[in-house]
């Protein structure tokens, strides 16, 4: 009997959301309008009342955060090699210099000792990434930035609903960027949002997202900074609002699924197979992904092929950024960040989405065990 294919991620849009988007389409106002304003209000409430602005991707959200922080040519920005390439690309996009720091082999997040070692007089900012939704040690990160007078632009693309010691990611800190791309825990099809420090930064965010324009009165229009075209539409905001209503349920279900993964893999799994499980954190992480690092003996592509035979989708998040051709051309080479390089070669993402059933997790774990021993 062949089982249906189990994808590693799946956006789930309910009928209420589909109906709400239909209303937007009929309303005569489909670009940025009342839905965007409402989504921003809801997000702001979620983040403890801080100003929030939305955009049409998590990528441009990060780029705009860097511009708001005044980062540009001559400035160094420290980030992790294990992220979606957008995290480093935006540093180049604003004309600054990306500096990588190796990751911690257990959390797979940027190693804060390595960050400290990478700081130079040119360093202006750190971009931490919370891989799979697991935050770094936020107390230490903030202390480190304070000590060296650095901005923190959090790439919290995967961390909506995550927290640190009882405080939501996004409710404290400097500039915090989230993504609503299709595979994220909450999606608007495509989109992102930025949590800002004050009203002045919010005004700047609005300018950067729409051609630098400021309007006044009936017909006043001026441009005083170079902005782009990064506004979220009401169609996207309608999807986002429909999804965001379920954030607590989504996070709770993902934590349940993660617990089930751990209990089904069992205590002896890592010892018996050489595969490394993620950190068993059910307080802070929103479990955006459930990732294993495979033993070196089994090439990832071979593992993925075996899982495909078993009708299980496997993702890989992410190959090390510094080894991509464009970054090699900037002088990065093999051996610079050995932990990131090994994790970048061997990391896999198992199926994880809020409508997965317990039986789906059982299937995935059974397939992983048999693929590792085949
Ligand atoms: C998704 C993601 C991004 C980019 O977000 P988009 O909305 O796809 O532009 C950036 N960083 C990380 C870590 C992500 O997961």
Image (tube, rainbow, N blue to C red):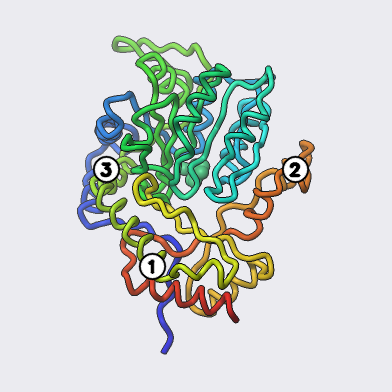
The residue at 66%/70% (across/down) is 298
186 displayed left or right of 125? left
The percent position of residue 250, horizontal first and vertical second, equals 29, 53
Q: In which quadrant is the C terminus drawn? A: bottom right
Which tag, 3 or 1, sits closer to the chain's start?
3
Q: Badge 3: few (under 14), some or many (20 or more) residues near its Cα, within 10 Å?
A: many
Label 2, ligand 1: CB separation under 8 Å: no
Q: Earlier in the sequence, mark 2 or mark 3?
A: 3
Residue on which disc 1 sits: 263
- Residue that mark 2 sits on: 336
Residue linked to disc 3: 241
In front of the other: 280 or 22? 280
Q: Residue furthest bottom?
A: 1
Report whether 232 appears left or right of 228: left
Tag nearer the camera, 1 or 2: 1
Q: Does 175 appear above or below 247? A: above
Give the crowd class for mark 1: few <14, some 14-19, many >=20 residues within 10 Å: few
Which sits in the foreground, 271 or 186?
A: 271
Say which residue appears at 36% left-offset and 51% top-offset. Answer: 282
Image depth: mark 2 or mark 3 in front: 2
In this view of the protein, can residue 21 be seen by the observer? no
Q: Identify the mark nearer the N-term, 1 or 2.
A: 1
Tell me the SS state at disc 2: loop
- In the image, residue 323 sits, relative to residue 255, either above or below, namely above
Task: Pinpoint residue 58: horizontal percent, then vertical percent.
Answer: 47, 39
């Amino acid at each position: 009997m062949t089982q249906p294919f189990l994808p590693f991620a799946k956006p789930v849009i309910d009928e209420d959301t589909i109906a709400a988007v239909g209303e937007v389409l009929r309303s005569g106002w489909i670009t940025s309008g009342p839905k965007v304003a409402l989504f921003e209000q809801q997000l702001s409430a979620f983040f403890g009342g801080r100003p929030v602005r939305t955009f049409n991707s998590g990528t441009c959200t990060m780029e705009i955060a860097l511009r708001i922080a005044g980062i540009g040519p001559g400035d160094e920005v420290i980030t992790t090699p294990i992220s979606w390439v957008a995290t480093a690309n935006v540093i180049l996009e604003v004309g600054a210099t990306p500096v990588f720091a190796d990751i911690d082999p257990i959390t797979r997040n940027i190693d804060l000792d390595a960050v400290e070692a990478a700081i130079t007089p040119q360093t202006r900012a750190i971009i931490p990434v919370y891989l799979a939704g697991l935050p770094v040690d936020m107390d230490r990160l903030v202390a480190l930035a304070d000590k060296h007078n650095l901005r923190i632009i959090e790439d919290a693309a995967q961390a909506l609903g995550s927290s640190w010691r009882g405080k939501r990611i996004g409710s404290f800190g400097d500039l915090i960027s989230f993504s609503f791309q299709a595979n994220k825990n909450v999606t608007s099809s495509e989109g992102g949002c930025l949590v800002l420090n004050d009203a002045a930064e919010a005004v700047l965010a609005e300018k950067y997202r729409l051609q630098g324009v400021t309007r006044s009165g009936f017909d006043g229009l001026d441009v005083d900074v170079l902005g782009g075209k990064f506004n979220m539409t009401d169609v996207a905001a309608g999807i986002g609002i429909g999804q965001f209503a379920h954030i607590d349920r989504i996070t709770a279900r993902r934590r349940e699924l993660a617990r089930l993964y751990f209990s089904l893999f069992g205590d002896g799994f890592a010892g018996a197979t050489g595969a490394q499980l993620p950190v068993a954190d059910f307080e802070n992480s929103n479990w955006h992904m459930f990732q294993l690092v495979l033993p070196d003996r089994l090439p990832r592509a071979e593992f993925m092929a075996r899982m495909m035979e078993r009708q299980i989708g496997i993702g890989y998040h992410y190959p090390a950024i510094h080894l991509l051709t464009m970054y090699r051309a900037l002088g990065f080479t093999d051996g610079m960040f050995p932990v990131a390089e090994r994790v970048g070669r061997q990391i896999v993402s198992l199926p994880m989405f809020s409508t997965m059933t317990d039986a789906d997790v059982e299937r995935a774990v059974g397939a992983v065990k048999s693929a590792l021993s085949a």
